[in-house]
Image: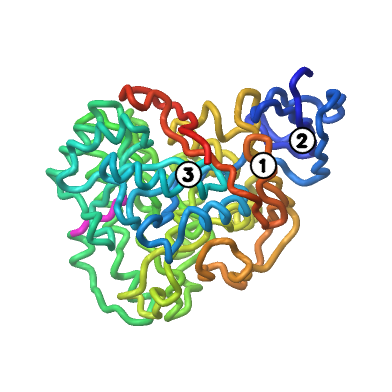
Amino acid sequence: MPGVRLVLRSSRVVTPEGTRAASVSVADGRITEVGPYDAPVPAGARLVDAGDDAVLPGLVDTHVHVNDPGRTEWEGFATATRAAAAGGITTLLDMPLNSLPPTTTTAHLRTKQETARPQAHIDTGFWGGAVPGNVSELRPLHDAGVFGFKCFLSPSGVEEFPQLGPDELESALTEITGFGGLLIVHAEDPGRLAAAPQRGGAAYADFLASRPRAAENDAIDRLIALARKLDARVHVLHLSSADALPAIARARGEGVALTAETCPHFLTLAAEEVPDGATEFKCCPPIRERANQDVLWQGLADGTIDCVVSDHSPCTADLKDGDFGTAWGGISSLQLGLPAVWSEARGRGHTLDDVARWMSAAPARLAGLDGRKGAVAPGHDADFAVLAPEETFTVDPAELQHRNPVTAYAGRTLHGVVRATWLRGRLIAENGRPGPATGRLLQRTGAGAGTGTRAGAAGTP
């Protein structure tokens, strides 16, 4: 086949049609063919045989807090994207808060892009932020290529990114709907949180009681009503409360444009096993009980939950101080999402096809990237995660690539070793060790004209 420079062969290639033995041909960074396993290798092409290791589409993580610039001691584009590459992630979208400045104006977006461009090991795009007083900035940010807008309904934890009150939420969503945009929401009701007991201290049970399921449920009910009223597109971030699933399913069945995600820690960690004082497990909303986790898995299986993304929200070790009332809330798991989810999924009867759908195809679709990312299929970018599904490893935080060696998965034995990660036909990580930064910055196709939902490159490092 003319122009083919790489053929990646495996007995287990995970495609949209299912897993099969295949040879994947690559030219100019794109997949040109997914052909028979024993197809002849074109003259001049390099053959890479992955044997029985599985070839998945590179993961797409649409929920990552890089914190750069401004809180780079917490994380940064260099370390976050190295960790992503080592974990089989080939595309991430950076959240608009925890950096200084936050991504709430076009000038702030340019600062973020300039910071990321020389450091990105994987393809990287950006969410904008919806905060009080910036409604006039939303369309310019959309035109500049952000993939949508994040807001909080309760305090975010950082003063430079305040939550939206009810009237502010409706104003922002009205504006975003006017240009066909997407609002992604941290959905916890502030009234419910304020009414819950706030004891602080080392007891995880006290922290769990301070973030009740009702806070998520009420906030999601409010989002559903507003999305229905405005005919708006709304996405629920990091769903923790399984009690909200029936309302989400009903709304979708009625035609409300509502999607939802959950995270590896909600699917693999349980409140019953969190030791007191172990604030590396603290996140908001919180890790809940095993019974709740079982229902979240059911929501994934029946399609009520669309995708699984990391919500990687790291910090320095001193901010995980053993007091659940004062410690920073966030789980560091960027490199571990694929093996963590696979470890639990395999025991529940799910397949790698399911994992690829939840962690690659669905988040790519959420961001409008599904024309280029999220599938081993002709025309898509040649982004691959090569996984040894049956092999295990024990998590050593010191061996991970993110900046601070803190993770709730420390000491856990997980199934699924990421052998290699390929970005647009180039090997970018092997055996947990990333190579040079070769990622591109992404924006929506049509940015500058205020239209379009597909994504394209916006320059290279």
Which of the two discs, 1 and 3, sits closer to the camera? Answer: 3
Residue 283 occupies which quadrant of the picture?
bottom left
Circle 1: is it few (<14), some (14-19), or many (20+) Cα within 10 Å?
many
The reply to whether the magenta stretch includes residue 78 is no
Q: Are marks 1 and 2 in contact (CB under 8 Å)?
A: yes
Total residue callouts: 3
Range of residues picked out in magenta? 186-190
Say left or right for 376 vs 323: right
Residue 397 position (above or below residue 201):
above
Question: Which amino acid, by three-letter code, is at mark 1?
Answer: Trp
Residue 39 appears anywhere in the view: no
- SS type, badge 2: strand
Residue under the point 63% across and 47% down = 350
Residue to which mark 3 is pinned: 117
| Residue 230: image location, x then y, percent | 21, 30
Residue under the point 26% across and 78% down = 199
Circle 3: is it few (<14), some (14-19), or many (20+) Cα within 10 Å?
many
Q: Residue furthest top?
A: 2
Question: Which amino acid, by three-letter code, is at mark 3?
Answer: Arg
Q: CA distance from mark 1 to mark 3?
A: 19 Å
Image disc number at residue 422: 1
Question: Which amino acid, by three-letter code, is at mark 2?
Answer: Leu
| Disc with the residue nearer the chain's start (1 vs 3) | 3
- SS type, badge 3: loop
Residue under the point 43% across and 25% down = 445
| Residue 293: image location, x then y, percent | 48, 58
Q: Are marks 1 and 3 in contact (CB under 8 Å)?
A: no
Residue 376 appears anywhere in the view: yes
Residue under the point 40% across and 42% down = 126
Q: Residue furthest left?
A: 167
Residue to which mark 2 is pinned: 8
